[in-house]
Amino acid sequence: MSTAIWPHVAAEELSRVQDLSLANELKWLLDALQDTLKSLKAGLEECAYLLAPTEHGSTLVVSSHRSESLKGFITRVGTRIVKGDIKLRLASLPIPKAYTSYPLAVSSAPHAPPLVLEQLTAARTLINACLDVVDASTWAGDSGDPHFISGQMRLLDVNIHEAKAALKGGADSEASTWWSSLIDENTFDPPLPSNLSFHLSILDAAVLLEVRTLELVTSTTPDHHSAFSFRDRVAVALGASKAQPHDEMGAVFVYKGQKVTVREKLRVESQDPNLMAAMAKLNALERSVALGRKALDMVMEKDD
């Protein structure tokens, strides 16, 4: 069975009508995408607000689970940590006299180097770039040019994806390399000890704090892998797994130009509601952009 058009339409006329229909559909879609761009701008402005400095900032508790090894708080204002009061109890970090724990306090002195979360700086920059793209798509360029709008939607897709990646963090992020992401010791008052690494990053929209005590690698550095008690050695001989104090035990890192090993390591995550909300909004915005791009590609008859 075949389908025929009645009355008969000439091939040229049919092609003209099809082209006209496609052109009308494309015009309708471009008009609809202007409304989408307005919604995207509102969502991006909300994300920018969540990452912007506020009067009081976000005060986050940082505390080690089931131990007194690390207790305290930090206050984030925009991309900076402006306050911090942390107490450490580590076997490899001597406690000063008259103290019950080692104090770490972010300096409030005007000349103190700032403690900046570079991932948040990157995310804010990318979100602002998205807002510029939306404004250019609405006011500066030809909103009726499908190729122009397609390029702008692609820029939005890339920038939103990278902003999400900055808030996601993880092992592939440059911010995760604590040995190269150095903090000026004068950021703290008193200054950070030379054998202590203090590292802040963003992981899954949470603030991740890692504290490490370090030891220089020399020819006389003991092999920590062999530093087991008699009971540990017997347990290993009987088939038990070899206990590790932390996941970087025995690894050698280059820190401030010197080879070091990590003696003790603490890792604490603190959920930040504003960062979590920004991540959720970016996820929704990314889906909206993807749907707009897909619809435009289909009407423009682009290959998938």
Image (cartoon, helix red, strand yellow):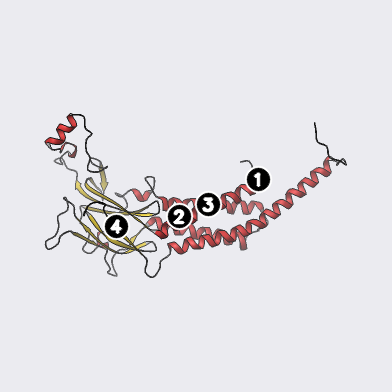
Query: On the image, which quarter does residue 41 sit in?
Result: bottom right
Q: Secondary structure at mark 1?
A: helix
**Front-most of residues 182 and 37:** 37
Residue 253 numbered mark, or none: none
Q: Residue furthest top?
A: 238
- Of badges 3 and 4, the one in the foreground is 4
Residue 279 numbered mark, or none: 2
Q: Earlier in the sequence, mark 1 or mark 4?
A: 4
Q: Position of residue 18 (x, y in %)?
A: 77, 45
Looking at the image, residue 121 sits to the left or right of residue 113; the answer is right
Q: Which residue sits at x=49%, y=62%?
A: 46
Q: Which residue sits at x=67%, y=44%?
A: 301
Q: Which residue sits at x=83%, y=42%?
A: 12
Kindly report the distance in space between the C-alpha atoms of the residues bearing marks 2 and 3.
10 Å
Query: On the image, which quarter does residue 99 sit in?
Result: bottom left
**Three-letter code for the amino acid on which mark 1 is drawn:** Met
Q: Position of residue 6 (x, y in %)?
A: 86, 41
- Of badges 1 and 4, the one in the foreground is 4
Circle 4 Cα neighbour tier, 10 Å, few/some/many (<14 / 14–19 / ≥20): many
Residue 298 numbered mark, or none: 1
Q: Position of residue 20 (x, y in %)?
A: 77, 49
Whether the residues at callouts 4 and 2 have beta carbons within 8 Å, the answer is: no
- Judging by the rendered image, the residue that carries numbered circle 4 is 62
